[in-house]
Amino acid sequence: MNPARRKRLILIGLMVAGVAVAVGFALNAFNQNLMFFYSPSEVAQGKAPPDHAFRLGGLVTNGSVKRLPNGLTTRFEVTDNTRTVTIEYTGILPDLFREGQGIVAHGKLNADGVFIADEVLAKHDENYMPPEVADALKKSHKVNSAAGGREGALGREVNSAAGGREGTLGREEGVSASQKGTAP
C-alpha cells in the first residue's frame, strides 16, 4: 500500500471513529435526560425505575395536602382513582395547584416509596389536563369498571377534564365561520 493511500485510509478511519464517539456522547446524554411518565398504579406495581428520574401524574387527592414544619415542603397524594402515591415537594407550588386538580411532577422515588418531586406542574386552565394524566385516568377507569367501579361518572369526569367537548366544538367553529360571512 502506498503512503498517500495509507494516510487517506487513516484519516477516514479517524473521522469515522470521531463521529462514532460523538454519536455515543449524544445517545448517552439523551438517555440521561429521558424521562418517562408513570401513573400511580404503575408506580405502586413497581414499574417505575427506583434510581432514575421520571414523571408522575394524576389527580391531587382531596384532603391530602399538608405543609411540613419547615414551611416550604408540601406533602400530598396523587391518584389515578385506582392507586395513590405520596409526593413530597420542597418549593413554591404553582398558583393553580389545588386538591382535585390534575398535576404532573418530575422527580425520583426514595427508599420509603415517597416520590420526591423536583418540579410540580399544574394544569393551566379549567379545560386542560395533561394528556398522560387523562390517558392514565381513562386506563384506570377501564380497570375500575371491569372490577365493578363507578363506570359512567369517571369517564365523563376525565373527558370533561381533558377538554373533551365533542359536540360543542363543531358548532362553535360553524358559528364563527358564519359570522365571518363564509360558509362552513
Image (tube, rainbow, N blue to C red):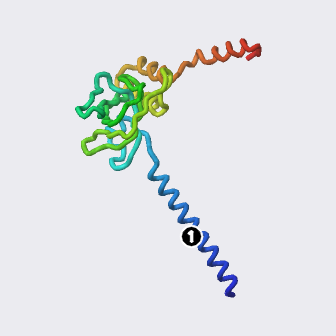
Which residue in the rendered view is the most extreme toward the left? 69
Up the image or down, 71 lies above or below 33; here it is above
Up the image or down, 175 lies above or below 10; here it is above
What's the residue at 28%, 26% (across, down)? 64
Q: Secondary structure at mark 1?
A: helix
- Residue 178's quadrant in the figure? top right
What's the residue at 72%, 12% (across, down)? 179
Say what amino acid the circle numbered 1 marks: Ala
* Closer to us: 51 or 154: 51
50 relative position to 179: left or right: left
Where in the figure is residue 153, as x and y percent of width and height?
Answer: 41, 17
Q: In this view of the protein, can residue 139 be seen by the observer?
A: no
37 relative position to 85: left or right: right
Where in the figure is residue 100, as x and y percent of width and height?
Answer: 37, 22
- Residue 85's quadrant in the figure? top left
Name the residue that disc number 1 marks.
Answer: 17
Which residue in the rendered view is the most extreme toward the right? 182
Up the image or down, 39 lies above or below 95; here it is below
Q: Quadrant of the N terminus?
A: bottom right
Where in the figure is residue 21, as x and y percent of width and height?
Answer: 53, 65
What's the residue at 31%, 31% (across, down)? 84
Q: In this view of the protein, can residue 4 be seen by the observer?
A: yes
